[in-house]
Image: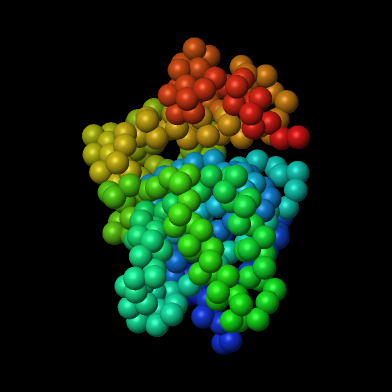
Amino acid sequence: MKAKFEMIIQPEANSYKAYAYEKKEFDTPFHYHPEYELTYILSSHGMRYVGNDVSGFQQNDLVLLGPNLPHCWKNISPQKEKAGAIVFHWGNDLLGEHWIEKKEFKYIGALLSNAEKGIQFDSDFAKSIKDKMLFALKNLPFKNLLTLLDILNDLAHCNSQRVISSDAFGHKINPVDFERIQNINQYLEKNLRNKINLKKIASTVHLSEESFSRFFSKVMNKTFFSFLNEYRINIACKLLSGSGKNIAEVAYAAGFESLPFFYRQFKKYKHCSPMNYRNTYAEV
């Protein structure tokens, strides 16, 4: 499935669109649009796809996306609660042409420039601006616009942020590669517990093993097996924080055949042990 273009229709009385929603699960396909997007996850958990990055998400996930950066949030297991989010969309002409070049918007300009690769903010910081985002859903257009600028200023001065996607991906990837990456993701979702070798995964996108390796490294800026291990560790994190499975059960459910290898990969990507992660992030 190709990344789909989404048309954002701005309200007549506003310079940007702000809304909250709640549904059974996040079901929006991998898509892109020319507007900036700020998304705050109110509830639910799963996998977040932004450019060439696939990461786990949970409540209080806050992400800023630049124009035409493909993205989606997907649930990967049955949810105890509905999926909820607050979403803001706005264009380059929010305050008119060249507004971002004004001296007063120096830091916001730098923030929006970095957003072309996507930015994730720390959950504690996310909680601190939640009320402002909710405020912008309820008030008159003038106050809403001022609130958005205030939020962008807060984001620009936040020290706990992480660039999500790499320079190698962005919105420049062609539709054929989009479709291949989607097919790979769908195969992984269905076969996570199975042994996945290069021949099998290459066949899903009709490439030889050698061609597949070149393609994947070029588009995703990492080898396939590095991506696969990171993907499985993110699945394991969801299981550690939201299930009663013991460590071995989590490792095997995420597709790891060797417990020592699971521990090494977990340390590599999360910089702590699975048990420490569970003690820190376990759902109450």
Q: Is residue 277 above or below residue 205?
A: above
Q: Residue furthest front?
A: 104
- Report whether 239 appears left or right of 71: right
Q: How is the image coloured?
A: rainbow
Q: Is residue 281 above or below residue 51?
A: above
Name the spot of residue 134 as percent of width and height, x first: 67, 64
Q: Is residue 17 visible?
A: no
Q: Residue furthest top?
A: 260
In the rendered view, does 160 fall on the left or right side of 23? left
175 up-or-down from 120: above or below: below
Q: Position of residue 271 (x, y in %)?
A: 47, 25
Q: Residue at x 64, y 29 (%)?
A: 280
Residue 21 occupies quadrant: bottom right
Q: Nearer the viewer, residue 156 or 251?
A: 156
Residue located 30% across and 56% down the image: 173
Q: In which quadrant of the rendered image does the N terminus lie?
A: bottom left
Q: Residue at x 61, y 20 (%)?
A: 275
- Pick the quarter of the image with the C terminus: top right
- Tell whether 113 sits left or right of 119: left
Task: Tell me what residue is drawn at x 67 percent, y 60 percent.
Answer: 131
Please tell me how many numbered marks the rendered image carries. Answer: 0
The answer to whether residue 88 shows anywhere in this view is yes
Give the percent coordinates (x, y) of residue 135: 67, 68
In the rendered view, would you say 268 is above or below 186?
above
Q: Position of residue 149 (x, y in %)?
A: 51, 69
Looking at the image, residue 82 sits to the left or right of residue 61; the answer is right
